[in-house]
Image (cartoon, rainbow, N blue to C red):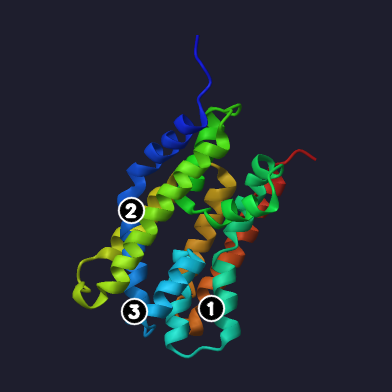
């Protein structure tokens, strides 16, 4: 007879299942930490940004705009658009966390990350009645946060000593690709990724990286359109 997992067991399961993706998370965090300092932010500003924002893709998208003295609204809007996927994440997580107090939901929302979200979705897909899902989520989320912040802080404080030819950006990009590819098993996601990726290449020369914003918008619209066409009327 199998006994249900305790919260402690579920927490450590979340940690264990996140760790295989740890090297990719570390590489991406290191790239972001180095990029913040090399873009002109002070160490104090960089530390504050990485702890408060905790959003590597948005930070990397906003940094070139900040370095080029782009208008504040463009920087903020870019970061917002790049992170729109977290609205989708939040909608998915709502059923799991809606009964919790607001303060705890806020903390869990802050800890959402791409890698740990994929792990959590995989858990619920394979075990939809898993009884300790919040403890599992916390284990994966905290492990992801620690790895990311450790790498980002290392990049911030060691930016001047880290050679630019280490290829860390490529490592981080490959880690994100490894996350995206399994999600492309769903046709709406595949359509959105294909449209966004193609448009990002076509529009890469637009000023202020507006090609990225355009690609995100059109990719999301394509995914939603395909999803709506697949639903039974």
Quick one: 46 or 173, which is closer to the camera?
A: 46
User: Which residue in the protein does label 3 denote?
Assistant: 37
Tell whether 82 sits left or right of 63: right
Nearest the eye: 168 or 158: 158
Q: Are marks 3 and 1 in contact (CB under 8 Å)?
A: no
User: Left of 167 or right of it: where is 228?
Assistant: right
* Other residues around mark 2 within 10 Å, as few (<14) / some (14–19) / many (≥20): many
**Residue 183 appears in the picture as rendered:** no
Q: Secondary structure at mark 3?
A: helix
In this rendering, the answer to whether 20 lies above or below 38 is above
Which structural element holds mark 2? helix
Q: Earlier in the sequence, mark 3 or mark 1?
A: 3
In front: mark 2 or mark 1?
A: 2
In the picture, residue 39 is in which quadrant? bottom left
Real-space Cα separation, disc 2 to disc 3, in angstroms: 21 Å
**Local crowd size for mark 1, using a 10 Å CA cut-off: few (<14), some (14–19), many (≥20):** some
Which residue, given by chain and number where applicable, does mark 2 sit on? 24
Q: In the image, residue 168 lies at what x, y percent?
A: 27, 64
Q: Residue at x 55, y 75 (%)?
A: 78
- Image spot of residue 226 (x, y percent): 65, 50
Q: Residue drawn 56% across and 64% down?
A: 83
* Viewer-nearest residue: 227 or 57: 57
Residue under label 1, please give it.
Answer: 210
Contact between labelled residues 1 and 2, with CB atoms less than 8 Å apart: no
Locate the C terminus and report the quarter of the image it occupies: top right
């Amino acid at each position: 007879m199998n006994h249900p997992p305790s919260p402690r067991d579920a927490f450590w399961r979340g940690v264990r299942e996140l760790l295989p993706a740890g090297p990719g998370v570390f590489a991406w965090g290191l790239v972001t930490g180095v990029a913040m300092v090399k873009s002109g932010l002070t160490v104090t500003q960089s530390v504050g940004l990485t702890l408060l924002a905790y959003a590597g893709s948005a930070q990397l998208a906003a940094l070139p705009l900040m370095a080029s003295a782009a208008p504040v609204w463009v920087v903020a809007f870019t970061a917002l658009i790049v992170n729109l996927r977290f609205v989708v994440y939040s909608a998915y997580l709502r059923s799991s966390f809606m009964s919790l107090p607001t303060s705890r939901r806020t903390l869990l929302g802050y800890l959402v990350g791409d890698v740990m979200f994929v792990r959590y979705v995989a858990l619920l897909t394979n075990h939809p009645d898993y009884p300790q899902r919040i403890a599992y989520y916390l284990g994966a989320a905290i492990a992801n946060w620690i790895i990311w912040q450790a790498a980002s802080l290392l990049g911030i404080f060691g930016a001047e000593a880290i050679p630019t030819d280490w290829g860390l950006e490529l490592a981080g990009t490959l880690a994100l690709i490894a996350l995206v590819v399994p999600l492309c098993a769903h046709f709406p996601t595949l359509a959105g990724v294909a449209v966004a990726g193609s448009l990002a290449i076509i529009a890469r020369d637009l000023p202020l990286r507006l090609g990225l914003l355009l690609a995100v918008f059109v990719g999301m619209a394509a995914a939603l359109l395909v999803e709506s066409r697949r639903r039974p009327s």
